[in-house]
Image (cartoon, grey):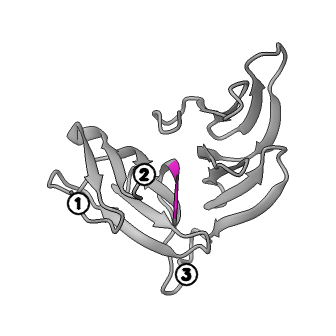
Amino acid sequence: EHGVPAGTTRACFLDDDRSALLLRPGRDIRLLSLTEPGEAVVLSKGDFTAITTLDDGTWLAFDAGTDRILRQQLSGDAVGEVVELEASEPLVGGIEPFRDVVALEPHPDGVLVVERDAHRVRLVGWDGSERIRIGGKGGEAGRFRFPVDVATTPDGGMLVVDRDNHRIQSFAADGTWI
C-alpha cells in the first residue's frame, strides 16, 4: 500500500487482483502483472512520491518535480490534473505549495494529501480548492509529528498514522479531532 518510508518502492494493488502499480520514487510508475511473467510497463516518468487508485479506473500520483497531483488512466494517458501549483507562488486565497507529500487517499470530496514535513493532512477538492486542513507539529490531540499515511472511513472521516507520536488519530468528516 502507499505511504511507506521515502526512497522505497510503493505498490498499489488494483481491483482486478491480477496487477499492481509500482511507484519508484523519483523515477517512474509501472504497471506489473501479478499473474503473467514479464517486465513491468512504464506508465509515466517523473519525480513521484505518492500514488493511489480510484474506483473509476484512474490513478492519482503526486509529482514533486512539478508540485502537482496528476490524475491518469491506467493506460498512462493523462485525463486531467486535480491540482496544479507553482511551488514558488501560492495561489491567492487558494492552496499553498505542497511539502513532502508521502501519501494520497481518495475521499468523497476529493483527495487527502499527507505532507510529512509540514506535519499536516489536507483535503483537496476535485476543483483544486483546499477543503480541510488538519494537524500542525506537536504531540497534542489533533497535531502530528511526521504523519505518513491516511485512510478514509465510510462516513468521510479520516484516520491518520502519526509516526513519531506512535499513534493513529481519528477525525470527523469536517476535520474535527475525535
* Amino acid of disc 1: Trp
> Mark 1 packing: few (<14 Cα in 10 Å), some, or many (20+)?
some
> Mark 3 packing: few (<14 Cα in 10 Å), some, or many (20+)?
few
Q: Are marks 2 and 1 in contact (CB under 8 Å)?
A: no
Of circles 2 and 3, which is in front?
Answer: 2
Q: Give percent across and percent down for residue 151.
A: 42, 46
Q: CA distance from mark 2 to mark 3?
A: 31 Å
- The residue identified by callout 3 is 91
Q: Which one is nearer the viewer's eye here, 153 or 83?
A: 153
The residue lying furthest to the top in this view is 37
Q: Which one is nearer the viewer's eye here, 21 or 9?
A: 21
* Amino acid of disc 3: Leu
- The residue identified by callout 1 is 177
Residues in magenta? 104-108
* Amino acid of disc 2: Pro
The residue lying furthest to the front in this view is 155
Secondary structure state at the residue bearing disc 3: loop
Q: Is residue 16 left or right of residue 120?
A: right
Q: CA distance from mark 1 to mark 3?
A: 27 Å
Which badge, 1 or 3, comes first in the chain's sequence? 3
- The residue identified by callout 2 is 154
Q: CA distance from mark 2 to mark 1?
A: 16 Å
Disc number for residue 66: none
Which badge, 2 or 3, comes first in the chain's sequence? 3
Q: Is residue 131 above or below residue 138?
A: below
Which badge, 2 or 1, comes first in the chain's sequence? 2
Residue at image coords 81%, 41%: 43
Q: Residue 37 lies in magenta, yes or no?
A: no
